[in-house]
Image: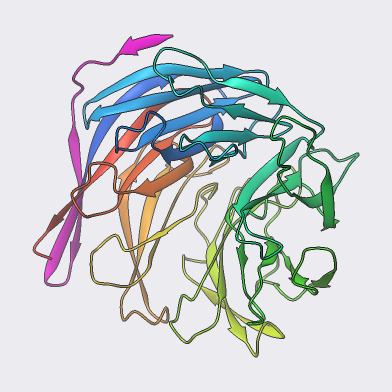
Amino acid sequence: MKTVLGLFISFFFVINCIGQSMSFECHEIGTFKDRMGQTSLIDIDNDNDLDWVFGRFGEMYWYEYVSSDNWILHELGKGASTDVGGCPHDVNQDGWMDYIVGDSWYENTKKPREETFVIHNKNMINCHDNIVVDIDGDNIKDVVSLSNNPDHPVLCWYKIPEDYTSNWNYFKIGNGIHGGIAPMGYGDLDNDNDVDIVRGNAWFENADGKGQKWTLHENLTPLNGNRPDKFGLALKTWCTDLDKDGDIDVVQAEADTQNGRVFWFENQNKGESFVFHLISKDTTNQDFHSLILADFDGDGDTDICSGGGPLSQEKHKMFIWENKNGDAKIWSEHTILEGRRIHEAIGADVDFDGDIDICAKPWHGGQHIFLENKLIDF
């Protein structure tokens, strides 16, 4: 399937900061079906720019980036079983990006504009979240999955076999269901030179460094408790050294809830304890089913972005929280978009002009959008 999108009306959302300003120009990518997830910004066709990937139960598509106002729709493939989650990875190491979704992976044929991907249905779990990271320290990326099946609540990882088309057998990390490890729920939290995994309200220590022995630490507890979520534990997670003190902290957004928050846990003593810090307001009436960490204002530190999803109780808004002093102690909230539902937004330099843009979509049908970052006076 291939549809050329014409030129759409663009408009500006402007942030005014002290002594500086920043704006995002909103371009319409295209209108698509209901209940789309599995989003990524990756180079599908190897033309050295980023394309917009998304999908739903058994269907996947991608918009080829041509320019800010021109995106071409292609079918990626059919057959995988999951609604959100999904992640890009060059599974067969042929230099072309493949895509892992739930119980399957899609192989790029090297002709993605003319051909759909080849699906490989495996014995993988139906999952809500996928991430790709080297678990066992062999410098080859593995796949981590978090279940979306209440009858099989498992957090696990797969070592991709040399025969890429053979079954992928998993190693269990622990129990878990729904959302908590995406988009970047991994890092060396205990500073022992291996990769640990954060599952929403807890983290799993990679005790042997090989992914065969895991120790559960249930010490990621936000003040005022987790907000009620509709489908079980639902947090977007990003691990990074937010305060630049040499250890890995945890940033999270509350999703699938009517009054979500964005906050971070300051790592204390190699993961033995964490200090909770609120980033957003405590009351937002927004459903934060997205989380992006990036330097949006070009000042060299990490800012945070999220937006209101389907369960939001007020007018849908998208925010950037500006890291004022670079140490994550003071945050300035800026509304960059209003009236658009935001779900599974992704940030990257799409137009290759040196700043971070955003692609986003709603959950319940509607317009996919490209928010072009227009840095001014930076």
State which quarter of the image contains the N terminus: top left
Residue 6 is one of the magenta-drawn residues: yes
State which quarter of the image contains the C terminus: bottom left
Prevalent SS, magenta region: strand
Q: Is residue 266 left or right of residue 245?
A: right
Q: Is residue 310 left or right of residue 227?
A: left
The answer to whether 254 is drawn above or below residue 118 in the figure is below
The answer to whether 72 is drawn above or below residue 204 in the figure is above
**Looking at the image, which is closer to me, 287 or 96?**
96
The answer to whether 132 is drawn above or below residue 298 in the figure is above
Q: Which residues are magenta?
A: 1-23
User: Which residue corresponds to the image point at 29% horizontal and 60% vertical from the top-left?
Assistant: 296
Whether residue 33 appears in this view of the structure is: no
Quarter of the rendering containing residue 80: top right
Q: Position of residue 203 (x, y in %)?
A: 73, 68
Q: Is residue 374 left or right of residue 27?
A: left
